[in-house]
Amino acid sequence: MSASAVKTLVTGGSGHLGANLVRRLLKDGYAVRVFLRKGSNNTALDGLDVERVYGDLRDFPSVVAAVRGCDRIYHCAANVSTLDGDTHFKQEIYDCNVTGTIHILRAALDTGVERVVVSGSFSAIGHHPSQPSDETVPFNPFYPHLPYGFTKSCVWHECLKAYADGLNVVIATSCAILGPNDFKPSRMGRTLIDFANGKLLAYVPGGFEFVAARDIVEGHILAMEKGRPGQNYIFSTQFVTVDELMGIFEEVTGRDRPKLRLPGAVMAGIAGVADFVFPRFFPNMPRRFTSGAVRILRMHRRADCSKAKNELGYQTTPIKDAICEAYECFARRGLIQNQTIPLGIGI
Ligand SMILES: NC(=O)c1ccc[n+]([C@@H]2O[C@H](COP(=O)([O-])OP(=O)(O)OC[C@H]3O[C@@H](n4cnc5c(N)ncnc54)[C@H](OP(=O)(O)O)[C@@H]3O)[C@@H](O)[C@H]2O)c1
């Protein structure tokens, strides 16, 4: 069957991963339907030849209407957050991520969808203190996880239940995404914008496993084409320390890193105070350093994506290219003032 005959639903198409995935699917010739929320910032899809269907993951009838008639689904939508949050927040993130995924999986089973790829998170993979984590390391619920991590662990569990019920579903697990078409923008995107505008005042040492947007998109396509049903595959590009990241940001933007490098323990203390103050006095203000974010950076988590490489032929691209592409996208959208490096020479 030609790609144009394969009706492909993408949830979360206005988000960072979804916006890159939709562009790749269109380039490959697929007929793409996107599931969007009315009233959200959906500019990531402006000008693209996609079929738009509106609803909310929490509303089952709207999910069924979006899924009906589709051959394949990429379920990328989720509430992505590093907040600990209050009871209301926890209920909301559970409803979007867990109940929303159950709705997608149930609708896919009911309407006979050929295959579903669900975006997983590295936060739902267990932590191994002395070696990189692969898909076999169990998620330990007694470790201090964020509500988001708990929900993504439940998402994986729900996928396995749907697989047991007969659904052809594969999980494509992502690490922290860096790259272009970040229209919301993401936490990492905001950090790059602030760095380029000289507004990043301090940073904390630490490190994390990052994935280039191009690579996680490729991972989702490979999971759809070659993934074994019921399996989870981790896709990462490389582990990067915050000091290394600051160095790449300097090269890409032509600006110096902030002079203030706060020790992790100090930043954890500041973030802890902010966790108390912000929800009470500035509830809607976006925050870069929550306690959860600082804790994750200090864990130096590493990923082992041998399974994706060996089974699916997954290959990575340079992380610096992803940062250059992100910078150029932000600059073209006017989010970076006084560019010191002309566009197009970064890569
Ligand atoms: N970003 C990362 O570093 C990272 C790391 C690991 C895993 N992941 C996973 O990758 C996937 C994509 O993440 P992302 O970075 O692209 O996230 P994102 O930029 O925050 O986008 C999330 C998307 O989900 C949609 N969404 C959220 N709640 C919804 C609901 N109730 N109904 C319908 N749509 C809803 C959002 O639409 P609205 O604009 O309407 O809210 C948005 O389009 C997620 O499953 C996430 O867990 C991401």
Image (cartoon, grey):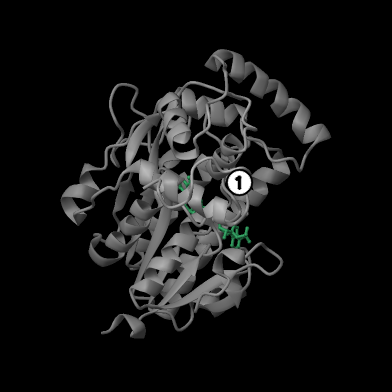
Q: Is residue 25 above or below residue 331?
A: below
Determine which residue is flagged by label 1.
336
Location of residue 108 (image quadrant): bottom left
Residue at image coords 58%, 71%: 46
Q: Does the residue labelled 1 lie within 8 Å of ligand 1?
A: no
Q: Say left or right for 346 vs 3.
A: right
- Image position, residue 154 (x, y; %): 47, 48
Location of residue 88 (image quadrant): top right
Q: How many numbered circles does the render carry? A: 1
Location of residue 100 (image quadrant): bottom right
Q: Is residue 154 above or below residue 224?
A: above
Q: Say left or right for 220 vs 203.
A: left
Please state which of residues 208 and 228 is positioned toward the viewer in this rendering.
208
- Image position, residue 26 (x, y; %): 40, 74
Dot 1: within a 10 Å radius of its alpha carbon, few (fewer than 14), some, or many (20 or more) residues?
many
- Image position, residue 7 (x, y; %): 40, 80
Q: In which quarter of the image is the N terminus?
A: bottom left
Residue at image coords 20%, 48%: 309
Please state which of residues 146 and 166 is positioned toward the viewer in this rendering.
146
Residue at image coords 71%, 66%: 39
Residue at image coords 32%, 47%: 235
Q: Which amino acid does label 1 sit on?
A: Ile
Q: Is residue 246 above or below residue 24?
A: above
Tell me, yes or no, if residue 15 can be seen here. yes
Please state which of residues 132 and 30 is positioned toward the viewer in this rendering.
30
Q: Can you name the residue that lies furthest to the left here?
A: 310
Locate ligand 1 by image quadrant. Answer: bottom right
- Image position, residue 270 (x, y; %): 67, 19
Task: Provide the secondary structure element on which disc 1 rests.
Answer: loop
Tell me, yes or no, if residue 182 can be seen here. no
